[in-house]
Image (spheres, rainbow, N blue to C red):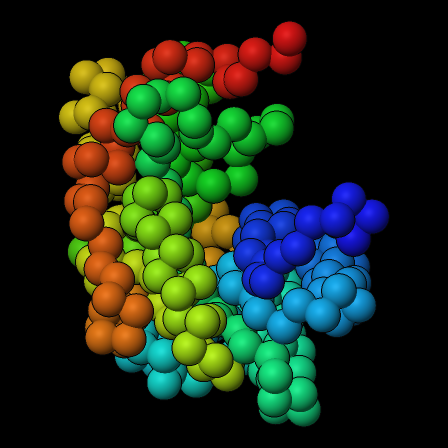
Amino acid sequence: MRQNGHRFSAVMHFAGLKAVGESVQKPLEYYRVNLTGTIGLLETMKAHGVRNIVFSSSATVYGDPKYLPLDEKHPVGGCTNPYGKSKFFIEEMIRDLCRAEKDWNAVLLRYFNPIGAHESGMIGEDPQGIPNNLMPYVAQVAVGRREFLSVFGNDYKTDDGTGVRDYIHVVDLAKGHIAALKKLKENCGCKIYNLGTGTGYSVLQMVRAMEKASGREIKYQITARREGDVASCYADPALAERELGWKAAFGLDKMCEDLWRWQLQNPTGFSKN
């Protein structure tokens, strides 16, 4: 960017590997990509005189919740998988940097579970190979690309025995990043916010919601629990509303409708041409 003469004042850091189950099988790859990639980015920012960053962190930094809903004061670091640990380590790196060099500003956004797509149906998630996340897999079953969904465990201490998560529309998530950029302009130091809706839904509730959106049956099979998963995880997003003026606007029906529109218009994913 320096060679091209472009000036920039902030960086949004989205890059990294992001699948809980895969991270358990490939821990070194997750640490190498996520940690060393971030160190390289921060060093490049310093070289260009850029001291403002928004980082895509994760609710997985909370580990197995001690209480719900999860607020930003909940203890962190007791992560149950290498993906979450990599996010926690990066948070600590950025916090240390902001403490050591007072001209740095950072907003660390702890995502819950982004789903959905742009309402046009033109922009959506197109996983390479077998999806690692629930809703892309559910959508592919609905459209006929996969035969059935594997549900990892039905013996959790939840209403129906399946894992509960806080799902947030990707458009709401994007708006949260705009709010975070505005916060950086206040020379805010290092701030941390949850981005979630505050409502948890089980795996089977998500299956039924997608059946409603698609009008199609979604077959599933119960399998063993997946290592690294927790029973329930959902946000207290009040701090983001107070300090960023941000609040999730879209509910579960909208998330599933937009996801289904994308999948129906792109049954095999983006064109490779």
Q: Position of residue 251 (x, y in %)?
A: 18, 44
* Residue situated in front as seen by the camera: 66 or 54: 54
Q: Is residue 76 above or below residue 84?
A: below
Q: Position of residue 104 (x, y in %)?
A: 60, 79
Count of marks overlaid on the render: 0
Report whether 3 appears left or right of 174.
right
Q: Residue furthest front?
A: 5
Whether residue 140 is visible to the viewer of this picture, yes or no, is: yes
Q: Position of residue 18 (x, y in %)?
A: 58, 50
Residue at x 72% of width, y 70% of height = 49
Q: Residue furthest right?
A: 3
* Residue situated in front as seen by the camera: 58 or 152: 58
Residue at x 36% of width, y 43% of height = 170
Q: Is residue 147 above or below residue 113?
A: above
Report whether 242 appears left or right of 220.
left
Residue at x 43% of width, y 29% of height = 124
Q: Position of residue 53 (x, y in %)?
A: 57, 66
Q: Is residue 97 above or below residue 231?
A: below
* Residue 139 occupies quadrant: top left
* Residue situated in front as seen by the camera: 221 or 263: 263
Whether residue 26 is visible to the viewer of this picture, yes or no, is: no
Q: Is residue 111 above or below residue 143?
A: below
* Residue 137 occupies quadrant: top left
Report whether 262 appears left or right of 88.
left
Residue at x 61% of width, y 83% of height = 103
If the image is split into quadrants, where does the C terminus sit? Answer: top right
